[in-house]
Amino acid sequence: MSETPGYDAEKIRLRLSRKELSDEALTELATSIAKLDADGFSPTDVFPIGIIIQEGAGAHFEVKHDQLGDLVSRLAELKDLRTDLQIFPKGIIAPDRFEVRAKMTQISR
């Protein structure tokens, strides 16, 4: 049976829970990424970040040029998460598309 496309909060929690991360941080990361997915910014991949101790989550998105600013703004507005972004044009193969790589870590309280 194949998985349904998209990332809801439960799929993200399952994917990230294979590493050490507090329940609070895990819930916050999963909820934030799932909300982006529900709003039309579907990640192409979601994965834990950190080798020995998990620091957070990574998510990759592919968006059109006219969606880029909105996605970047939405990622920057995530509460209680620090988000580092890398943006790459897809180039000659898809000149109007960009890959956005987001690394999200919880801000210490």
Image: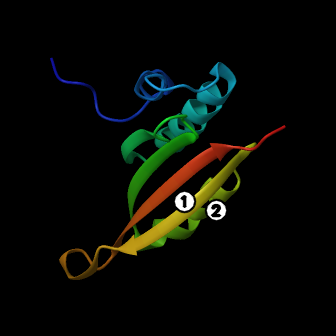
Residue shown at the point (65%, 31%) measured from the top left: 28
Residues 96 and 90: in front is: 90
Q: Is residue 90 left or right of residue 106?
A: left
Q: Is residue 65 left or right of residue 80?
A: left
- Give the residue type at disc 2: Ser
Asked if the residue under mark 2 is in contact with the one under mark 1, i.e. CB atoms within 8 Å, the reply is: yes
Looking at the image, residue 40 lies above or below residue 90? above
**Secondary structure category for the residue under label 2:** helix
Mark 2 packing: few (<14 Cα in 10 Å), some, or many (20+)?
few
Q: CA distance from mark 1 to mark 2?
A: 5 Å
- Give the residue type at disc 1: Leu
Looking at the image, residue 10 lies above or below residue 72? above
Residue 25 place in picture, x, y as percent: 65, 30
Residue 84 place in picture, x, y as percent: 59, 60
Residue shown at the point (49%, 67%) measured from the top left: 86
User: How many callouts does the rendering have?
Assistant: 2
**Secondary structure category for the residue under label 1:** helix
Q: Which residue is mark 2?
A: 73
Q: Is residue 4 left or right of residue 48?
A: left
Quadrant containing the N terminus in the rendered view: top left
Q: Is residue 40 visible?
A: no
Q: Which residue is mark 1?
A: 71
Residue shown at the point (45%, 28%) measured from the top left: 8
Looking at the image, residue 27 lies above or below residue 49? above
Q: Is residue 84 visible?
A: yes
Looking at the image, residue 15 lies above or below residue 103? above
Residues 107 and 50: in front is: 50
Q: Is residue 22 left or right of residue 92?
A: right
